[in-house]
Amino acid sequence: MCHQAQTGPVSRCERNSVARLACCIAALVAAHCAIAADSPPETDAPGNIIMIQAAPRVVHFESDPDHTTWSWMVGVEWQRPSRWLLGFSYFNNSFDQKSQYYYVGYSWRLSERYPNAYFKLTGGLVYGYKEPYEDKVPFNHNGYSPGIIPALGHKWDRWNAQIILFGNAGLMLSVGYDLIR
């Protein structure tokens, strides 16, 4: 039960309850989609892929004196032949806080003419945006918030590069390598 003062038309307690509900719904939908994705693989699709990735820097659309000078990301991702994927990223957020992103997603080829170009959309749970920056991500509650991350990428044999968009905050360029395929 919340015992917080009303701060306008919607109290902080009500916002926190909605944030918790949104996180639970996002996690359940994402897990259901990943588990239920038993569509047949594409005819030229490889087997399961375990990919590691890293991004040395974030480019922000607007500067903020609170932004750290060094944001980075490392991660691991498992992609099924059906192009559904699961992943984990560990990163230093824009405010110098160590954070994590647990996600599921899907990767689409952009065209048959350029089969190595793809669009990837992931959704999951972000953890790590804490006081005084908890309001920098939507629906944050005690450092937990839902996340939806789109990316454009290109593969070269076992290597890939992606441009990852973070809403209206910024983007990063990541490089990945398929350890297992």
Image (tube, grey):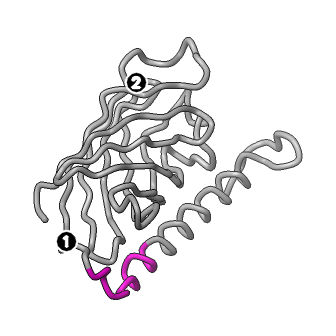
Q: Secondary structure at mark 2?
A: loop
**Looking at the figure, which quarter contains the C terminus?**
bottom left
56 sits to left or right of 25: left
Location of residue 83 (image quadrant): bottom left
Visible residue check, residue 106:
no
Crowd class of label 2 (few under 14; some 14 to 19; many from 20; radius 10 Å): some
Q: Residue 73: x and y, percent?
A: 31, 36
Visible residue check, residue 80:
yes
Toward the left, the furthest residue is 180
Q: Is residue 32 above or below residue 139?
A: below
177 sits to left or right of 83: left
- The residue at 27%/75% (across/down) is 81
| Disc marking residue 48 | 1
**Marks 1, 2: nearer the viewer:** 1
Location of residue 132 (image quadrant): top right
Q: Which residue is at the front of the view, 142 or 51?
A: 51
- The residue at 49%/74% (across/down) is 28
Indicate yes or no whether the magenta region holds residue 33. Answer: yes
156 sits to left or right of 68: left
What distance separates the C-alpha of mark 1 from that of mark 2? 34 Å
Crowd class of label 1 (few under 14; some 14 to 19; many from 20; radius 10 Å): some
Q: Secondary structure at mark 1?
A: loop
The residue indicated by pointer 2 is 96
Tags 1 and 2 in contact by the CB under 8 Å rule? Answer: no
Toward the right, the furthest residue is 9
Toward the top, the furthest residue is 65
- The residue at 49%/34% (across/down) is 171
Q: Amino acid at mark 1?
A: Asn
First of labels 1, 2 by sequence position: 1
Q: Is residue 118 above or below residue 89?
A: below
Q: Residue 125: x and y, percent?
A: 45, 55
Give the extent of the magenta segment: 31-43
